[in-house]
Image (tube, rainbow, N blue to C red):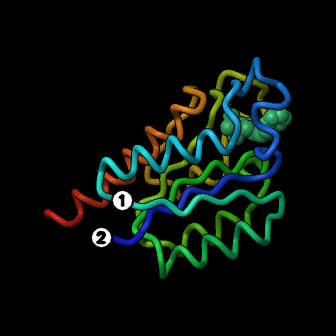
């Protein structure tokens, strides 16, 4: 079994399914965890699925992923738009990084149009609700598999 795919979620995403379902959908983060694990298992991967409201904790997990992950999926939430420190941590990763958003931030307020995370990401999946996470896991697994066959 390859190293797990780390799936990290940033601040306020613990409230999913409880508030603002018109923007972020009805799935809870627990629902999304199950969907990611199921999709990953079908592709021969395990998932480490975590959420934090704290920038430093997310950075610690990105650093942990340097040693322990085969790829990283991250929904940085609000920190994507603000955190140079998170970008610096991501830049130290050699593994594929898939940035993931439930909504399509490019179609929302101007300040959401770009993220620092995009500067380090291999690719981006956004706008598909909970399915964005599943597609991001699939993309991450595909990148890992492709790297192994080259
Ligand atoms: O669309 C996404 O996944 C976002 O990363 C969500 C962030 C937002 O700042 C980004 O621009 C796009 C906000 C996460 C807030 O999550 C909540 C969930 C339920 C209720 C309230 C907030």
Q: Residue at x 61, y 70 (%)?
A: 62
Q: Where, by quadrant of the figure, is residue 109 drawn?
A: top right
Residue 107 at what x, y percent from top left?
67, 21
Q: Residue at x 48, y 57 (%)?
A: 97
| Horizontal side of residue 20 vs 94, given as left or right | right
Figure quadrant of the N terminus: bottom left
The Cα atoms of the two marked residues, 1 and 2, are separated by 7 Å
Q: Residue at x 76, y 36 (%)?
A: 16
Q: Secondary structure at mark 2?
A: loop
Image vertical order of residue 54 relative to residue 39, above or below: below
Image vertical order of residue 91 relative to residue 123, above or below: below
Q: Secondary structure at mark 1?
A: loop
Cβ of mark 1 under 8 A from ligand 1: no
Q: Residues within 10 Å of mark 1 (few under 14, many from 20)?
A: some
Q: Residues within 10 Å of mark 2 (few under 14, many from 20)?
A: few
Q: Toward the viewer: 99 or 81?
A: 99
Q: Is there a contact, CB below 8 Å, between mark 1 and mark 2?
A: yes
Among the two numbered marks 1 and 2 on one chain, the one whose residue lies closer to the N terminus: 2
**Ligand 1 is found in which quarter of the picture?**
top right
Residue 12 at what x, y percent from top left?
82, 46
Farthest left residue?
Answer: 150
Give the total number of marks visible in the rendering: 2
Residue 64 at what x, y percent from top left?
58, 78
Image vertical order of residue 132 relative to residue 10, above or below: above
The residue pinned by badge 1 equals 45
Image vertical order of residue 118 relative to residue 91, above or below: above
Q: Toward the viewer: 135 or 41?
A: 41
The residue pinned by badge 2 equals 1
Q: Where, by quadrant of the figure, is residue 8 drawn?
A: bottom right
Figure quadrant of the C terminus: bottom left
| Horizontal side of residue 47 vs 9, given as left or right | left
Residue 41 at what x, y percent from top left?
36, 52
């Amino acid at each position: 079994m390859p190293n797990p795919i780390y799936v990290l979620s940033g601040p306020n995403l613990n409230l999913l399914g409880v508030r603002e379902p018109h923007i972020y959908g009805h799935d809870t983060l627990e629902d999304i965890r199950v969907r990611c694990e199921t999709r990953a298992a079908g592709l021969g991967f395990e998932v480490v699925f975590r959420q934090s409201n704290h920038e430093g904790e997310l950075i610690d997990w990105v650093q942990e992923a340097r040693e322990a992950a085969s790829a990283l999926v991250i929904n940085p939430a609000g920190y994507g738009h603000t955190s140079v420190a998170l970008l610096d941590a991501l830049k130290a990763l050699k593994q594929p990084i898939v940035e993931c958003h439930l909504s399509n931030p490019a179609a929302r307020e101007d300040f959401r149009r770009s993220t620092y995370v995009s500067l380090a990401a291999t690719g981006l999946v956004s706008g598909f609700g909970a399915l964005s996470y599943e597609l991001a896991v699939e993309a991450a697994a595909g990148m890992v598999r492709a790297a192994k066959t080259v």
